[in-house]
């Protein structure tokens, strides 16, 4: 059964060690509404990639896992597109910090720096 996605999530983080990988795997275990053939979390060397389109994504759990595993060397971002409320929330990881910003999807090009 195909569902209309209510949210889309795309992101990457590096370096990603084994402990962060396990924490992210647990955090994304509750996703709903994505084809089972498409993995939500993929690790390529020391980079973890997240890709999801579906009904429900546990963004709070993923953000918590990233915060708990954050190191000064870690870089990356996580974009959460809430299609129901037409908003983009971006979490940036850089220099040991996580910053969050939100904008309407209508303003996404200006918001993303393009």
Image (cartoon, rainbow, N blue to C red):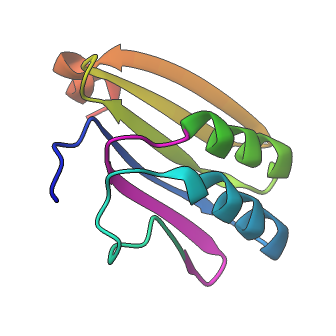
77 or 85: nearer the viewer = 85
- Residue farthest along the front direction in this orientation: 1
59 or 97: nearer the viewer = 59
Taking the image as shown, residue 1 lies to the left or right of residue 69, namely left
Residue at position x 79%, y 57% from top? 73
Dominant secondary structure of the residues highlighted in magenta in the image: strand
Quadrant position of the C terminus in the picture: top left
Task: Using the image, determine if residue 104 lies above or below residue 37.
Answer: above
**From where the camera sits, is residue 39 visible?**
yes
Q: Which residues are magenta?
A: 43-58
**From where the camera sits, is residue 16 visible?**
no
Taking the image as shown, residue 8 lies to the left or right of residue 3, namely right
Q: Is residue 1 magenta?
A: no
Q: Is residue 55 magenta?
A: yes
33 or 20: nearer the viewer = 33
Q: Quadrant of residue 106?
A: top left
Q: Quadrant of residue 21?
A: bottom right
Query: How many numbered discs?
Result: 0
**Percent coordinates x, y for residue 18 in the rendering:** 80, 75
**Percent coordinates x, y for residue 99 in the rendering:** 64, 27
**Percent coordinates x, y for residue 45 in the rendering:** 62, 84
- Residue farthest along the bottom direction in this orientation: 45
Residue at position x 37%, y 55% from top? 52
Residue at position x 35%, y 16% from top? 103
């Amino acid at each position: 059964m195909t569902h209309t996605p209510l949210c889309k999530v795309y992101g990457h983080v590096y370096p990603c060690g084994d402990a962060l990988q396990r924490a992210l795997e647990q955090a994304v275990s509750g996703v709903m509404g994505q084809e089972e053939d498409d993995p939500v979390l993929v690790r390529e060397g020391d980079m973890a990639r997240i890709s999801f389109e579906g009904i429900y994504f546990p963004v709070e759990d993923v953000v918590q896992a990233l915060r708990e595993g954050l190191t000064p060397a870690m870089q990356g971002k996580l974009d959460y597109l809430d299609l129901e409320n037409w908003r983009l929330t971006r979490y940036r990881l850089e220099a040991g910090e996580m910053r969050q910003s939100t904008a309407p999807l209508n303003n996404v090009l200006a918001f993303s720096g393009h």
